[in-house]
Every structure is written in C-alpha cells, then in structure tokens.
Amino acid sequence: MPSISRKASSFAESVIRDMTRIALQHDAINLAQGFPDFEAPQALKDAACEALQGGVNQYAITWGARPFREAIAAKTQRRHPGWVVDPERDITVTCGATEGMIAAMLGILDPGDEIVVFEPFYENYGPDAVLSGAVPRYVTLHEPDWSIDQAELRGAFNRRTRGIVLNSPHNPTGKVFSRAELELIAALCQKWDAVAFTDEIYEHIVYTGEHHPMATTPGMEDRTVAINSLSKTYSVTGWRVGWVIAPADLTSGIRKVHDFLTVGAAAPLQAAGVTAMASPDAYYDALATEYRARRDLLVTALRDAGFRTSVPDGAYYVMTDIRDLTDEDDITFTRRIAAQPGVAAVPGSSFYSSREQGRSKVRFAFPKRHTTLQAAAERLRTIGKR
C-alpha cells in the first residue's frame, strides 16, 4: 500500500490554518490567522487592476519583473542607506515569504546541516528545515521579555551549523531583537561560517525599539538572506508576492530552487508592487500607529478577561498564558472558546518543538478593524475561570 514520505510524516498540517477552518465552522471571530479584515490601500488595488487591464497577464522573468526588483532595491536602500542591493543579482521575487524561506533553505542547506531556530517560532520553520534535509537546533526565548540566554545560544552552534533563522519583529511573541542581540548572532555566524535567514515581514510594525536588518550588521553583508513580502505591510496576504535579498552567490541557488518550485509570482501583482514600494514614509508611520491602537485594545481586553499577557514590541500578535483561567491544555482551550464564546486563537504548542512547553500558551492576532476587536473583547469577558 503506497504511503506518504517520511519527511511529510514527520510534521502536521498548519495549526494556524486549521484554527481558521474551526473559526468558520463556529462563526467565531478569527483572531487566529494573521490576515486583516480591512481593505488594502486603494492605490495598490488600482495598480493591480490597471496591470490586469493593461495586458500584464503572462509570465514575468522567473526571478521577478525587473521594475519590481528595481523598486525593491530602491526602497531598501532608501530606508537603509548602508544596504547596497543589486536588483539584477541579489533579488528573487517569490510566491510570498513562505516560498521565499523554503526556496532559500533548499537552495543553501544540505542534508545533515544544522540550523538554529529560536522558539517559540512561526510554525513553518520546522517543516522548512525538515524538507531541506536539515536538522533544527532549538534555542529558547525566555519569558517574560523573551530574552536570549547567551550560553544556550553559543552552545547551539558547532561545526555542522550552516544557518540560523531570525524573525524580528517576532511571531508569535512580538519581540524586537536589539542591536546587541543581533551583534551576538552575527559574531556566531561569522565564527561558524553560518548564514542568517531573516524573516522581516513585520519590519514596519514596530512599537518599541527599532528594526535593524541583519544585513546592515557589520560582517553580515555576505551571509544574510533577507526574506520579505507585501502581505503584512500592505494588507494583501492573499496576493502571495514576496522576495528574497541575498548575496549573488547565494541568490544563484535560491533562484534555481524557486524556478522549479513555482516558476514565478503573479505578474500583475508584481506590477502593483512597484506602487507599494514607492509608499512615502508617512504610510509606514501611520501603519505602526494604527497597529499600536489595535494592540492596546486587545491587550487590555485579554487582561480584563484573565489572561496573563505580555505587551508585544512589534508585529501584530499577543502571546498569552491561560493558567489563571483554566487547567485545560492549549488545544482543548482554543477549541472550546472558538465554539463558545466564539473567538478563535492559536494553541501555543504549535510554536514549540515540545508540545509541553506551549500547553499553557495561546496566541491572538490583531490585524482587525476596531469593531472586530471590540466584539472579540465583549465575548472574551464571558470566558470566566474554569
């Protein structure tokens, strides 16, 4: 009897996407999956429609339409003047950051290589490593401020270490890695000849501190693979348009894998991406301000409902602890509250290599209209201790 591969057997389907299906079953307010319930900027929608009607409906160049790659490079260098990006040699446009990460790992890692992953982690990183044949080495971010234990991090690096995954601002905790932490990671990457795979899709959603791209850290120019997308910054998670910026020698491997994974991202949406990249600084300032208000609304509601809650410094998630509310584990709890009172969240164990580490944790997302968050707050107040 045919069976699926050992690789596919070693991990489960996405818990986040499963919670969206459960939310739909119960007509729950979906604070599980991180997508906005409000509209994308009108200028982007207009640009996409214009491209469609203007005949941009066939393949773009496999690694990305030149105008879009040039716009990505120009925006990167405008925001980070020390970061020099060649649009011809250093950029690969992908089908979202999700494809960007797996294409990068497949293009750079070999079976048996080790890759360091901070936990809790976005659930894709573990399967990405497995599919690449790599071995993840997990390093804990410690509560309450999700700090790094330097000795633990140093101990995770060895002669087999080929890479590290860094997500800042961080999903699911909202941690923004400091410059000192980045310098520690950079020093270890240089010592052990490792590559930093950086997921930077929340770069503009920062409330405390500042986002420092790893590629701008001294010594990391030639060993950083920066992954980004339109999804979060421009509220177009369904467009699936992302990109990878890496040194030319690493980009060559990423492009080969990308070509055979997906061929290319949607051409008319790449054309609209040129408009996105030209957004003024005021757009990004307003984005962070608006998300801060949403964060504060949800954090207050969660605390009022009895959750132990840390305030995120960036991104648009709140990681909570349910021990003051229930003796249930995270999976039982999230399934119960999705049904009644009707608020969907993500069980924390999906963000850890060991389920026990996340059994009392639950993640909520707040890229929602204020009316949606207020409605969720009303429902959350009815949970009560159990």
Image (tube, rainbow, N blue to C red):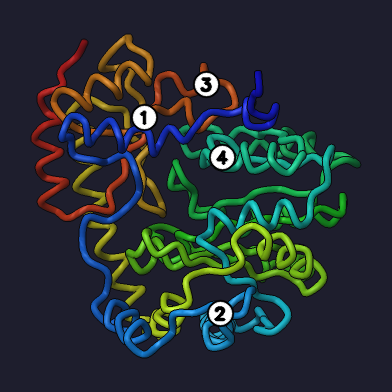
Q: Earlier in the sequence, mark 4 or mark 3?
A: 4
Residue 357's mark?
3
- SS assignment at label 3: helix
144 up-or-down from 223: above or below: above
Label 2 close to label 3 by CB (< 8 Å): no
Residue type highlighted by circle 3: Gln
Q: CA distance from mark 2 to mark 4?
A: 43 Å
Q: CA distance from mark 2 to mark 3?
A: 44 Å
Label 1 close to label 2 by CB (< 8 Å): no
Residue 251 in the image: x percent, y percent? 74, 69
Instruction: Please rate how many residues cluster around mark 1, counting C-alpha atoms within 10 Å: few if below 14, some from 14 to 19, many from 20.
Output: many
Residue 362's mark?
1
Q: Nearer the viewer, mark 4 or mark 1?
A: 1
Q: CA distance from mark 4 to mark 1?
A: 19 Å
Q: Which residue is mark 2?
A: 60
Instruction: Please rate how many residues cluster around mark 2, counting C-alpha atoms within 10 Å: few if below 14, some from 14 to 19, many from 20.
Output: some
- SS assignment at label 2: loop
Q: Earlier in the sequence, mark 4 or mark 1?
A: 4
Q: Is residue 19 left or right of residue 222?
A: left
